Amino acid sequence: MAASAKTLTIADRTLNGGWTVVLPRRGRRKHLPRIRSLEQQPWAPSDLETDPIRKSKLLHKMQICMNKIESSSFYHTLMDQIQTPEILGHFYRVLDSESKMQMVIYGIGSIESYETPRLQLSLAILLKKKFCWIGDIEVFDPILSATESQVLEALGCSVISVNEQGQRRAQKPTLFFMPHCEAELYDNLLRANWGVELLNRVVLFGNSFETYEQHVSEFKNSVVVDSARHVLGIRRFTKEFRIKTVSDDYFGAFHDSSWHFFCPVLETELQQYI
């Protein structure tokens, strides 16, 4: 996510408790209230019927996307970055004595309607294919259709049946794959894991927290402060590694994305910054 107001995403709540990725528009925005407790509700696609033809076409599109990424300089550059001793060391630190790190994907969007979500999902699947220590992939977005859910399952993922509002607690090593989600969703995740033991089990792939901090510093944006209090508070305990998009083909899907690893030491330190 770029530092400009054009690309900085924030939360847009819906009446049914869902969330979507939105872009700030020019002009005054309504102040978003700070919500401390979010109800997690059972979820199912609003359309119950699936279409075999749509499913077949979407699977074909996904295969094209995966092939495209796997042969790209963007993918090879990213793999080289992950396998540097420093970043790989952080992954192994999070794994600790576990052999697998589960992956949770929030906010993927409609993989049937747009190429950007297809590219993002393709990368997640390729990461699992590349690294034996990445385990099962769980996916959630409230806008997923029944057909999209079936395609995700055909690709080896499982669709989460509860809208967790981003509040999954990392009871075991977990890679949260969340490119271009809104600030409040990252904040929900961090708040749910706001403890030394839990944060040390989390890897986050998503929008640059450094960019959030810069945006707040430069533009004094109170909306971002309210919706990203934990994002800003965790910065001093975060090791962040920005990825390179390399070409314009992948800029829309991955620009301003980073790997985030969290290394707090004392519980009392965490409480000082929220």
Image (tube, rainbow, N blue to C red):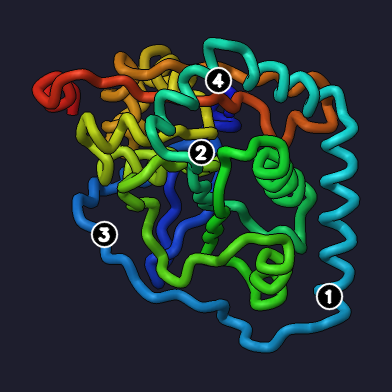
Between the residue at mark 1 and the residue at mark 4, the CA separation in whole angstroms equals: 39 Å
Between the residue at mark 2 and the residue at mark 3, the CA separation in whole angstroms equals: 20 Å
Residue, disc 3: 38
Residue, disc 2: 9
Disc 3 is placed on an element classified as loop
Residue 48: x and y in percent read 62, 87
Q: Vertical placement of 265 versus 189: above or below?
A: above
The answer to which quarter of the image holds residue 60 is bottom right
Disc 4 is placed on an element classified as helix
Which callout, 4 or 3, points to the residue nearer the camera? 4
Residue 80: x and y in percent read 72, 17
> Furthest residue to the left?
268
> Furthest residue to the bottom?
49
**Mark number displayed over residue 88:** 4
Which callout, 2 or 4, points to the residue nearer the camera? 4
**Mark number displayed over residue 54:** 1
Give the residue at x 13% y 26%. 267
Q: Marks 3 and 4: in contact by CB < 8 Å?
A: no
Counting residues from the start of the chain, the first of labels 1 and 4 encountered is 1
Going by the numbered disc 1, the residue's amino acid type is Arg
Counting residues from the start of the chain, the first of labels 1 and 2 encountered is 2
